């Protein structure tokens, strides 16, 4: 018979209302979501699902994490669970595909890290994460029109002139992006209490929206969330070739210190 492993989504403190939240909630591979409790740790719980070992052990994951369709579906399910919990309480989202041998290992992890988890949950209470990306867009064709044939340029000179105009437009966009980054930092500093700088995204769907130069996450008190979004979103106004993209609000993924997952293939006492 195929065994199972325990997939962990997030850590939270339960005031008694989270059982209702997870009732009927499904996570990765359509598995029902439950709660593992650390009774001695101030109501601390982890949201978990049981998943097939053959699909989530170390060997299987090495293959599956290269499958973008599987990865996207798993990420969506993971975030759906985290978002459902975050709508009710403060959560510490765990990394995608955080696996444990069984629920007892999850409970032991909660007990071991009880103090750190409770402290971080208190720090993040009533705060949300916003993502801010700055893109340099490709200049539109009409922005750098080809030289007028009546200008008397040879085809070769006309080509070089057109390429030079394109390069200048591109350089101007980068200068505008630097200015936008400064505006973003100034606007964000009025509201945010913390920031994490992520690596700029390259390739894939992100490249279709232009070149990503800034990929930051900000931690913002909930009471300032909409003001933050509005002010930061305006940071590229009047700067051609630059787009500021603000996403959220999210659970504080970038600001939660996740528990290190236990290698699922390792047996314990």
Image: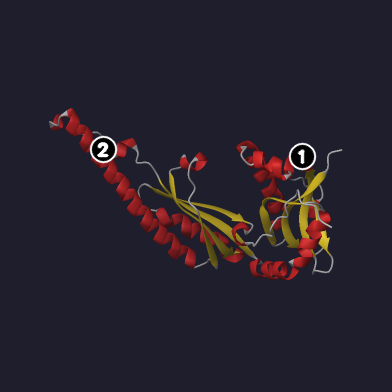
Residue at the spot of label 2: 163
The structure residue drawn at horizontal position 69% and vertical position 58%, both measured from the top left corner, is 260
Q: In the depicted view, which residue is nearer to us: 72 or 179?
A: 72
In this rendering, the label closer to the viewer, 1 or 2: 1
The structure residue drawn at horizontal position 72% and vertical position 69%, both measured from the top left corner, is 118
Mark drawn on residue 15: none
Circle 1 packing at 10 Å, graded few (<14), some (14-19), many (20+), is: some
Q: Residue furthest right?
A: 1
The structure residue drawn at horizontal position 60% and vertical position 65%, both measured from the top left corner, is 223
Instruction: Indicate the secondary structure of the residue bearing disc 2.
Output: helix
Q: In the depicted view, which residue is nearer to us: 55 or 21?
A: 55
Q: Residue 94, located in which quarter of the rendered image?
A: bottom right
Tell me residue 72's x, y (percent): 63, 41
Circle 2 packing at 10 Å, graded few (<14), some (14-19), many (20+), is: some
Nearer the N terminus, badge 1 or badge 2? 1
Label tally: 2
Residue at the spot of label 1: 54
Q: Is the Cβ of the residue at disc 1 closer than 8 Å to that at disc 2?
A: no
Q: Is residue 50 visible?
A: yes
Q: Is residue 3 above or below residue 150?
A: below
Q: Is residue 266 left or right of residue 196?
A: right
Q: Is residue 252 above or below residue 57?
A: below
Instruction: Tell me the CA gap for discs 1 and 2.
Output: 55 Å
| Quadrant, the C terminus | bottom right
Tell me residue 219's x, y (percent): 57, 63
Q: Is residue 255 left or right of residue 113?
A: left
Tell me residue 20's x, y (percent): 81, 54
């Amino acid at each position: 018979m195929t065994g199972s492993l325990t997939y962990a989504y997030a850590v939270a403190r339960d005031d008694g209302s989270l059982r209702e939240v997870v009732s009927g909630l499904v996570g990765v591979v359509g598995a029902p979501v439950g709660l593992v409790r650390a009774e001695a740790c101030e109501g601390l719980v982890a949201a978990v699902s049981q998943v097939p070992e053959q699909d989530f052990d170390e060997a299987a994951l090495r293959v599956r994490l290269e499958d973008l369709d599987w990865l996207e579906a798993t990420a969506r399910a993971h975030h759906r669970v985290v978002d459902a919990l975050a709508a009710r309480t403060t959560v510490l989202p765990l990394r995608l595909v955080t696996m444990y041998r069984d629920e007892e290992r999850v409970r032991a992890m909660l007990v071991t890290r009880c103090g750190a988890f409770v402290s971080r949950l208190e720090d993040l209470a009533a705060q949300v994460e916003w993502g801010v990306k700055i893109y340099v867009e490709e200049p539109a064709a009409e922005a750098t029109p080809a030289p007028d044939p009546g200008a008397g340029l040879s085809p070769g000179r006309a080509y070089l002139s057109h390429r030079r105009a394109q390069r200048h437009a591109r350089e101007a966009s980068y200068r505008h992006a630097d200015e936008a980054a400064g505006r973003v930092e100034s606007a964000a500093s009025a509201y945010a209490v913390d920031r994490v700088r992520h690596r700029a995204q390259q390739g894939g769907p992100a490249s279709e929206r232009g070149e990503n130069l800034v990929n930051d996450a900000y931690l913002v008190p909930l009471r300032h969330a909409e003001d933050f979004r509005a002010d930061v979103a305006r940071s590229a106004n009047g700067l051609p070739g630059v787009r500021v993209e603000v996403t959220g609000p999210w659970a504080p993924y970038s600001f939660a210190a996740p528990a290190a997952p236990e290698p699922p293939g390792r047996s314990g006492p």
